[in-house]
Image: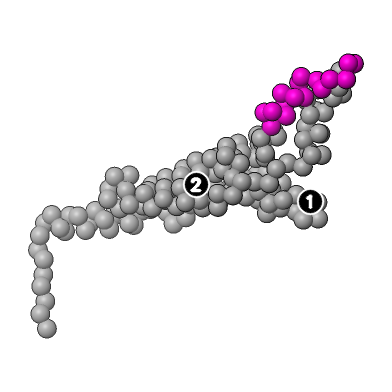
Amino acid sequence: MIHLVLDDRAVQQALDGLSRRASDMSPVMNRITQVMEEGTRTHFEEERGPDGQRWKPLADSTLLAYMRRSTGGKGLLTKRGNTRTAAVRALAQKKILLDSGRLEHDIGREFDSMSAMLTTVQPYAATHQFGDEKRGIPARPFFGFSEAIKAGIIDAVTKHLDGDL
């Protein structure tokens, strides 16, 4: 059997650096939560799930209720029978899952040396993520790993191991 021993200071320093970076993954886990959060916010902006599928449109009853709320109790129609401008504007600007904005804005990040995760304190988040068949609410997943998030995670890990993070 032949044993070769590499006694090279530069190689040893590179391996030592890699070992140190691999032993404390907290910086890369922090970066991974940032990548996940940015990707999740993109899902809200684009009204798409992590798989790229557009979310199902809002039900007519939801849109009508939203329009009614926007008029401040004045009703949808003017005395002349026209739709109130406030209701039309509100409908034109309506985004799916962004009624109050709390669902998107309350996304939290948690990480340690071995894990990275996103959280939310909103109790209705699961209803929107997975849907509720009994209530007729379709799944509109916002948490998950899109191709962009996966690429960002790989990039973060690579940079961390290369010492660039």
Query: Which quadrant would the N terminus be assigned to in this image?
Result: bottom left
Judged from the image, the secondary structure of the residue bearing numbered disc 1 is loop
The residue lying furthest to the bottom in this view is 1
Which amino acid type is marked by label 1?
Gly
Residue pictured at 86% horizontal, 18% vertical: 78
Comes first in the chain, label 2 or label 1: 2
Quick one: 23 or 6, which is closer to the camera? 6
Specify how the rendered protein is coloured: one colour
Left or right of 52 in this view: 91? right
Above/below status of 19 relative to 118: below
Quick one: 65 or 54, which is closer to the camera? 54
Q: Position of residue 39 (x, y in %)?
A: 51, 44
Which amino acid type is marked by label 2?
Met
Asked whether residue 44 is in view, the answer is yes
Residue range (magenta): 79-94
Q: Which residue is mark 1?
A: 136
The residue lying furthest to the top in this view is 80
Give the total of numbered labels: 2
Q: Position of residue 147 (x, y in %)?
A: 47, 51
Judged from the image, the secondary structure of the residue bearing numbered disc 2 is helix
Left or right of 44 in this view: 115? left
Residue 129 part of the magenta-drawn span: no
Above/below status of 82 relative to 146: above
- Label 2 neighbourhood size at 10 Å, few (<14), some (14-19), many (20+)? many
Residue 85 part of the magenta-drawn span: yes
Left or right of 104 in this view: 36? left
Q: Quadrant of residue 80?
A: top right
